Amino acid sequence: MRFIVNTRKEQQEMMDSIGIGSIDDLFKDIDEKMILRRSLMLRPSLSEQELVGELTKISSKNADVNSCECFLGAGAYNHFIPSIVPYLTGRSEFYTAYTPYQPEISQGILQAIYEFQTFICQLTGMDLANASMYDGASALAEAAIMASNVSKKREIVISSTIHPEYREVVRTYAEAHGLDVKEVGWQNGATSAEELTKVVSASTAVVLVQNPNFFGIVEDLYEMDRIAHERGALLVACVVEPTSLGLLKPPGECGADIVAGEGQSLGNSISFGGPHLGFIAAKQTFLHKMPGRLVGMTKDTKDRRCFIMTLQAREQHVRREKATSNLCTNQALNALASTVYLAALGKGGFTKLSALNAQKARYLRSRISELKGYEPIFSKPFYNEFVIKCPIDPVKINVRLEENGIIGGFPMRKYYGGLEDGWLLCATERNTKSGMDRFIEVLREVAK
Amino acid sequence: MKLIFELSVQGREGASLPELDIPEQDLGIPTAQLRHDIQLPEVSEVDVIRHYTALSRMNFGVDSGFYPLGSCTMKYNPKVNEAIAALPGFATAHPYQSEWLSQGCLQILHELSRDLAEITGMDAFTLQPSAGAQGELVGLMMAKAYFKKRGERRTKVIVPDSAHGTNPASAAICGYEVLELPSNSRGGVDISELKNKAMDDVAVLMLTNPNTLGLFEDKILEISEIVHEKGGLMYCDGANMNAILGISRPGDMGFDIAHLNLHKTFSTPHGGGGPGSGPVGVKAQLAPFLPKPMIERDGDRYFLNYDRPDSIGRVKAFYGNFAVLVKAYSYIRALGPDGLKEVAHNAVLNANYLMNKLKGAYELPYDRVCKHEFVLSGNKQLAYGVHTMDIAKRLIDYGFHPPTIYFPLIVKEALMIEPTETEGKETLDAFADAMLQIAEEARKDPDLLRAAPQTAPVTRPEALMAARRPNLRWRTPDDG
């Protein structure tokens, strides 16, 4: 049988050694009533050749952003991944290991996580970061819980310009944790400062805003910082598109107490929505309230620099029900991918990448605005996404684009009443001039 | 080893980006919102490759050698699954591309849910949770929603003292009070204690079966009955499903909710600590509360159903750790029903074989047939001033990854050993020889153990210093 090493003869030797007549003897402690008296109703086994054939066939039923021109972002971004990223994450010493419980033989992943934590601090302008979270959405929810634990207040104020699925996750966690969630509306595509001023009060634990927000717009974090902190609330900035941080002022310099975000853009494949990775970065004062793993630098007994999981007294395997979170596994391999990605791009490359994204998006927005019936809905500054008002239903436009091998934008009506004809488009460094021009030509045909 | 930041040389570049092929525009972002500087290293592609290759050589994975880390099921990760998950139709499919263009992905998700339901004896599955701990959270949230809908106020969750730490932590995050249930002398649930605790205010009993001692909870039907009689729900932490694949199913033991760890039982790589995947299955009465969307089928068409008024909502953006789910799907398709049963047979045979070889030299606190793993105690070695930690570190010198240690908490100086089915007899023999040798060394030369490991890239790290003066990030000299 595949992946099982022992032959029948070896199995027999082992049974003899234990003193049993058959393997079934090892299952005699299971009551007859619970023994499955039939085979599992699953399809029969496949050889490797058959398996690859079958799965390739299934995979080819999907479109993908590699073979299509893609203008879809909305929380999962089509960035180029340098070959060295999968090459290095494919080193079996990394991907077939588990959580570094034994630091002496896990220095590789431990040091890589320490470097990851540093990278996240550098990008966000914060003091400390953890070893990664499941994804951006749960990172935001955990950041909200963390802020509530720090402030001992139970009200969360969330901007409606945060990714709708992130808001759902925050609500799900908040419901379980007994926190109240108040939502604040938007104005010209950005969080309404006016409404925020009214909603945030002395009983507010934390204000959650996304930057750039779901509409692609750059929020005025300074203003959010002022409104939140004047009323004694903390500010969590959520970053869903971290390549923006090569261009935009880091949240840490705008007054954010905690930054929660998604790292998919940094070297991780889209993979139909996962696995990606979340991150949490915070000010130094929140060190002992951080969820998840933290890796620290220390020395070994021979005084050599080494790394270790630290401050574990916060964690579930030590504190059980008193832990800061129930996190056990994080997304180490995805964090490694992001670490390699950021190292490869480096200072110059990352800055250039951000600029490319912003420029491409502006070109696309200008070109599409030339078309009759298409116009940008918001006028505020944006990064690599923007919302366009369409002359016909964006869902219908997407169908027509698909016929031309183009993946269109995100129809806003899925989550935003009042923006029924809104279409969220994204351009990245992967969108070429010729690809964007072709998109415009197809759109022109569709509009006819 | 230097850090990547220490390799930085001003002006070096490690990646090439395309030149701007369009006219440059003013960005229209106010200067106050723009970044003036970013602290990232400047290294070449070769620097990056050498650095992380060197780091990888300081790491031990399943492909490096035997990795009997109890409760983690460190089985071999079939390479074909990596190749399949990397197919462009999977790896670069966008979660928001139309359903019409996503039929392959949706088919995988739909069929995997169905297969997992069959394997566990549950009625419906969500694939959304990113790991077992998130699965627990989802399970408890559903229980909470279920009781709320029924107008029942239940505030407590019972967790055995042998449980994974995530169980009580998940219950606490979900707002439940945790009642700890002591184990009996056979390593199972103490039935009379359970009867005392299982009252009308108990929402859920969380149980791992086989439990963390590697023992099958043989009173499980009685336990389920006690909990159900009081109106409570039974939750199965399915971390140890590897032992009973195709033999017995949580759904047939009285469990109402069960999570699986695909990175354990279903061979997806652990990734150095994730990504994992923790799907949750439920019996029909809890299905309305599953997270949304659900992947459903209408004739030949698969679709995402968001219309679920009683759903707890979401715990993740999009639909789950898809690439991990594809690997688990491939694994199930490769093995089929007979192969999965063979997995359980061999996992349990390997564990019992090893347990029998070691139980003389080491104390075996619960001496009965085990399932996929067993727990020894380093108690005998304590007499020589040697701790389980020292035994574990000495194993590194012998070329093995140590077992899980100091867990479960109810066994003093615990060594939790899970060989898995993907190891052969000669590996088990070699490991047993090393363990027996170490038992000898503990008696004759305890210092050897206390100074171990000596063959690893580093010796034991200073844990206390790391916690007292945490250094969690690098700062360049000009950072201050």
Image (tube, coloured by chain):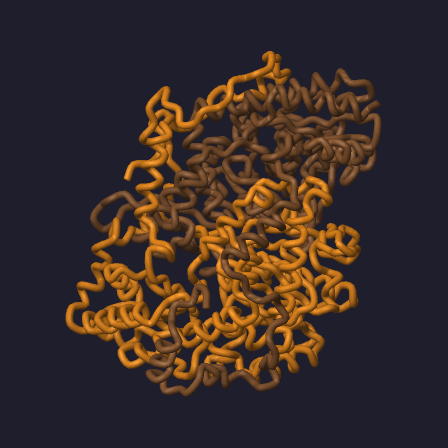
Chain colours: A brown, B orange
Q: Residue at x 54, y 40 (%)?
A: A269
Residue B163's place in the image compared with A442, above or below, is below
Name the residue nearer the viewer: B348 or A280: B348
Q: Position of residue B178 (x, y in %)?
A: 58, 67
Q: Position of residue A300 (x, y in %)?
A: 26, 49
Q: Position of residue B205 (x, y in %)?
A: 61, 72
Name the residue nearer the viewer: B389 or B47: B47
Name the residue nearer the viewer: A260 or B277: B277
Residue A165's place in the image compared with B366, above or below, is above
Q: Position of residue A183 (x, y in %)?
A: 74, 40
Q: Residue at x 64, y 51 (%)?
A: B315
Find residue B388 and report its image quarter: bottom left
Which residue appears farthest toward the left when viewing the image? B444
Q: Is residue B261 visible?
A: no
Q: Residue at x 41, y 53 (%)?
A: A96
Find residue B380 and report its image quarter: bottom left
